[in-house]
Image: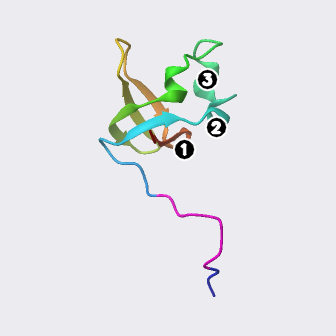
Amino acid sequence: MTDSASPIKATKPLRKGALVRVNPEKYKNSLESLASDALPPDYIFDGPGELLAVKGDYGQVRWRRPVPDVWLRMDQLEAWTA
């Protein structure tokens, strides 16, 4: 039996070419955040970044800035909305 009034929505998996941003709550205290600067740049949370590749649990993101591409866990990324 399915409850059509359920507030939980199924999310589509992110694919190559998707515009994304980093979810601050999932990034905080992660292995990736501990291996990076103590204060991450705001643009990773504001987005958009483009998902260039997906390999296993990780995605390569390119930001619209002159900075290197980064690999982040897919569960830390979410679709960017304007």
Q: Where is residue 65 in the image (x, y as percent from the top left)?
A: 36, 16
Q: Position of residue 21 (x, y in %)?
A: 48, 34
**On screen, residue 45 above or below 51:** above
Q: Residue at x 32, y 38 (%)?
A: 53
Q: Which residue is drawn at 55% across and 38% down?
A: 76
User: Element at badge 3?
Assistant: helix
Kind of residue sitting beneath label 1: Asp
Name the residue tied to disc 3.
33
Mark 2 and mark 1 lie on one chain; the one further toward the N terminus is 2
Relative horizontal placement of residue 29, taking residue 72 as reference (left or right): right
66 or 33: nearer the viewer? 66
Name the residue tied to disc 1.
75
Q: How crowded is mark 3: few (under 14 residues within 10 Å), some or many (20 or more)?
A: some
Q: Which residue is drawn at 50% across and 58% down?
A: 11
Relative horizontal placement of residue 35, taking residue 51 as reference (left or right): right
Q: Which residue is drawn at 58% across and 36% down?
A: 23
Mark 2 and mark 3 lie on one chain; the one further toward the N terminus is 2
Residue 8 shown in magenta: yes
* Disc 1 to disc 3: CB gap under 8 Å: no
**On screen, residue 58 above or below 28:** below
Relative horizontal placement of residue 30, taking residue 42 as reference (left or right): right
Q: Residues within 10 Å of mark 1 (few under 14, many from 20)?
A: some
* Disc 2 to disc 1: CB gap under 8 Å: yes
Which span is picked out in magenta? Answer: 4-11
Q: How far apart are marks 2 and 1 (CA)?
A: 8 Å
